[in-house]
Image (spheres, rainbow, N blue to C red):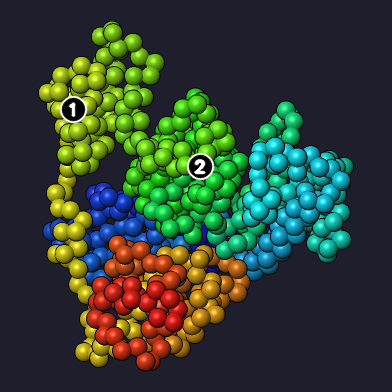
Amino acid sequence: MTYSDDFLEQLRAACPMETIAGNYVNLIRRGRHYVCNCPFHSEKSPSCTIFPDTQSFYCFGCGAGGDVITWVRRMENLEFTDAVKQLAEKSGLQVPNDREADRRAQLRTRIFAINRETANFYFRNLIAGNDKRGLQYFVSRQLKPETIKKYGLGYAPDSWNTLTDHLLKKGFTEEELLAANVAHRSGKGNLYDAFRGRVMFPIVDTRGAVIGFGGRVLDDSQPKYLNTAKTPVFDKGRNLFSLNFAKDSSSTHMILAEGYMDVIAINQAGFSNVVATLGTAITPEQARKLTQYAKEMIIAYDSDGPGQQATQKAINRFSEVGMPSRILHMTGAKDPDEFIKKYGSERFRLLLEQAGDAINFRLDRCENGLDTNTESGKVQLLKRVVSVLAEIQNPLEREVYLSRTANKWEISAEVLHQQVDRTIRSKRRLEATKEWKDIIEHTVRPEPQQPQSGNHLRERKAEERILFYILSKPEESAWIVDEIKPEQFSSALFQQVLNAFQESVRQQTSFSLSSMGDVLSEGEMGKLSGIAARNQEVPVTKEEVQDCIRALHPGVPETVETNDDLLKLIQKKQHPNG
């Protein structure tokens, strides 16, 4: 049976690779990844790595690899469909049949079209409609015309069925409007607009498709913000506002703001690397998604009580996926929007540079609500700080924070050491001493290759980098379809992957290793996972892939035998014409 890409993506999100693998083996955290002794061959030191950001695994010893479905297939000796059913049962998902999958694919296409037309309708109404309250609101928030256009901001008429009538005249059905959640049905059976009298914020995915909307009232009515409910193309717990712009930033860090207007204000001030969740606390799926685009997060939530509580939750989420985070400390303003208006973009840039680390933020909050002048207060404080310090993996880093904590609260450094060490032992946080690089050096086995000329090796490396880009950034890779044909790849497996990716672009569906799991063998899944694993430490850009595509054409004299050689070749080619 063939499963839709949408369902497989939903299944992967519900079954995190690290969670499922942890049910079978003992995982050890190594930075952003996990390692374990490979369950598919005998070994004494861990050579199998779990990659939470790509939701995949790869063993550098035996070459086994794939996604969470491949893992379960190999562990339980199951066929692809049986592994999917087992994971679906564990996560509470309903497995669709073929007819249902086709119907859902057609509905998704129609919903994308409805959302696109709705966004255009709201934008036209904001600019040319008779009711100017929406435009006046954005002007009062000091948004520039180009910013309003960039984000496609709009205004929903303060009426019951203006949008609904417009969409029905465009040929969409009532059932499709309900499925897209742009309309609701009253108790009497009549359709009415889901958003009325609100300024509108289109939510766009990384491929540029409008997947949902956020709306804000202009008075004191509730709810202040309203988001599109879950639809076949939208889930607010898995998407992020403005990631379509942030993904193209050259910065290695990402800013996480609290709301739409904060994000837009920060972007308008010159910082495109900013996103926000969609009215909820950040979810594990959102945190994992952000690891694909940044190496560090700066949390820029409001300075009030709820904002600080949300900051703590975000710190925990990023810690779970191995993402370092820092905290923006604002004085004289309650949020980034207000800070930028009062002090300007350069002061905000300095604020970002001075953002404190998450550990100090957590340690400083340990005394909240405690009377540290009492014995019971001191005991509770000690328990809290020990819990925080025990989570610091690097011993030298832990020592720095431990000394600071002992001095600040006048706690015996020796007692603090003992408590932290005891906690670490009880949680088995010191099970391995080898660093990630040592594991790679001692366990990597390069793919066996026949002796080839320099040109063939160069082409092979170029093909791998192109494929890695598609596998790691499928939502950004649609442009590749027009630049290279499957037959230009030397490997039949690579050709098959590109063919499948081209089809996903045409059908506007998601693409991942899972989407090919039912047609690839375990060995082929391992090869693809190996490519992703070997290229993990060297970020790939669109410009590099463009150079790799050109490298597949004859006439390039440079010899490329390793990834380092390929990078040197690419660095020499700063422009399309070399």
Q: Position of residue 173 (x, y in %)?
A: 81, 60
Describe residue 138's horizontal placement relative to residue 167 as left or right.
left
Residue carrying label 1:
403
Q: Is residue 146 above or below residue 283?
A: below
Q: Are marks 1 and 2 in contact (CB under 8 Å)?
A: no
Residue carrying label 2:
345
Identify the amino acid type marked 2.
Ser
Q: Position of residue 562 (x, y in %)?
A: 24, 77
Q: Is residue 2 above or below residue 89?
A: below
* SS at badge 2: helix
Q: In the image, which is nearer the foreground, mark 1 or mark 2?
A: 2
Q: CA distance from mark 1 to mark 2?
A: 36 Å
* SS at badge 1: helix
Q: Position of residue 551 (x, y in %)?
A: 38, 83
Picture quarter with the C terminus: bottom left
Q: Say how many tags the image has.
A: 2
Q: Nearer the viewer, residue 10 or 335?
A: 335
Q: Is residue 150 above or below residue 217?
A: below
Describe residue 263's horizontal placement relative to residue 455 as left or right.
right
N-term mark: 1 or 2: 2
Describe residue 46's horizontal placement relative to residue 347 as left or right.
left
Q: Position of residue 460 (x, y in %)?
A: 32, 82
Q: Quadrant of residue 186?
A: top right
The residue depicted at 75 percent of the width and 53 percent of the height is 123
Q: Nearer the viewer, residue 406 or 252?
A: 252
| Mark 2 surroundings: few (<14), some (14-19) or many (≥20) residues within 10 A | some
| Mark 1 surroundings: few (<14), some (14-19) or many (≥20) residues within 10 A | some
User: Is residue 500 visible to the viewer in this orientation of the structure?
Assistant: no
User: Is residue 325 visible to the viewer in this orientation of the structure?
Assistant: yes
Q: Nearer the viewer, residue 492 or 366?
A: 366
Q: Quadrant of residue 465?
A: bottom left
Identify the amino acid type marked 1.
Ser
